[in-house]
Amino acid sequence: MNAKPVDLRELTKEEVTALVAGLGEKPYRAKQVWEWLWKTHAPSIEAMSNLSKGLRAGLAERAVLRPLVLAEQQRSDDGTVKCAFRSWDGHVVEGVLIPTEKRITACVSCQVGCSLDCAFCATGRLKRLRNLSAGEIVDQVTGIAKLSMELYKRPLTNIVYMGMGEPLLNYAAIMHSTERINAEDGLGMSYRRITVSTAGIAKMIRQLGDDGAKFNLALSLHAATDEKRSSMMPINDSNNLEELMAALRHYTRLTRKDVTFEYILFRDINDSPEDARNLVRLCSQVNAKVNLIEYNATDDGRFQRTPIEKALQFQNYLESKGITARIRRSRGRDIDAACGQLANKNEPALKDGERVLKPLRAAH
Ligand code: SAH
């Protein structure tokens, strides 16, 4: 028989309860198993130390537990730490710990590679190999949270789905993982601290509205006309601005939440006064806030960063029209951990076990 083994973290609570009952165990054992899966994060079934050997053996006969393993970490001069996680089937995905004065954020990946091919993004050059499971997404959060305590003695304050991949093309795992991050019998973090960023899949944005999604939503806009947007984001051909704005209105009406537009400023491409006016028009349609993002070079030279004076003018214009606009300075650039730079550059060098490329300095 070659049936695919069931991963314990693909099961609902009811299914875990039934599985444990089927092994002749009392109901509180199911609760313990559930907590090992989602609260204390056992690295294996064997490690669930308060369960009897018999129960562990019974579980291991019927199911598997295959968490991501932190394989490598690199620390930037600004304190950002890029983590390479390895999956049971040998893939590597990256997650990032981003400490700032006010926040300490985990940025997580949701797919191995990405299918969208945005011209400015290094991840877009990797083929999409597979979706990550909800458990594998939560593994990045718990792995990064542990590092945060070890290095900075601070618990995570925010989680952003802005690593590799397109979250809304892995919808079920996004819903499940955010629910587990939020749940009392999970990580217990407020939905307000979770942000999912999408390149813009109109149908799934509507679905978020229908499902009453409670996390924050950010749209990677980057251009305010279809012509410009399609020239750098092929996904815009099938999900144009009109469809996206209509989907966002549906979403905001049903969830009563705001949206944030992410807008990378590219020198002489999307940073003119006319671009700013077009952006204002889109913002007014859905009441959006804007994060202006510094471009991080991804090697090919087609795009350049807008000079800071011009970025400030762009920001001032938006603010003068009553739109909240912030400039997001880049972090972790020296180790290719910044937005759009996640591309498994070190993957060929990965070996089993932990390998630290840059010496880790103590937290200050
Ligand atoms: N696929 C999702 C999430 C991953 S990207 C999305 O597109 O939103 C997270 C953010 O980083 C997005 O806003 C993305 O457009 C931005 N980004 C990608 N490449 C970048 C680069 N080279 N410099 C700065 N930001 C970049």
Image (cartoon, rainbow, N blue to C red):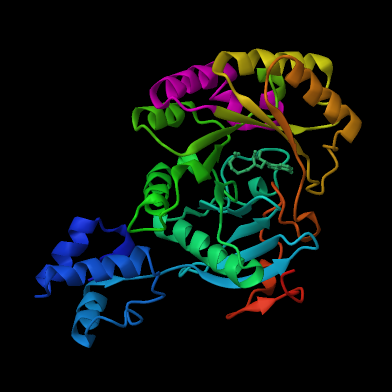
Rendered location of residue 225, percent (x, y) = 68, 17
287 vs 350, nearest the viewer = 287
Residue at image coords 33%, 82%:
46
Q: Quadrant of residue 79?
A: bottom right
Rendered location of residue 68, percent (x, y) = 48, 67
Asked if 255 appears above or below 275 in the picture, the reply is below
Asked if 261 appears above or below 113 in the picture, the reply is above
Left or right of 38 in this view: 61: left
**Ligand 1 shown in quarter:** top right
* Span highlighted in magenta in the image: 229-258
Say whether residue 284 is visible. yes
Looking at this view, name the residue that lies furthest to the bottom: 53
Rendered location of residue 246, percent (x, y) = 49, 17
Q: Quadrant of residue 156?
A: bottom right
Residue at image coords 39%, 69%:
40
Residue at image coords 76%, 76%:
359
The quarter of the rendered structure image containing the N terminus is: bottom left
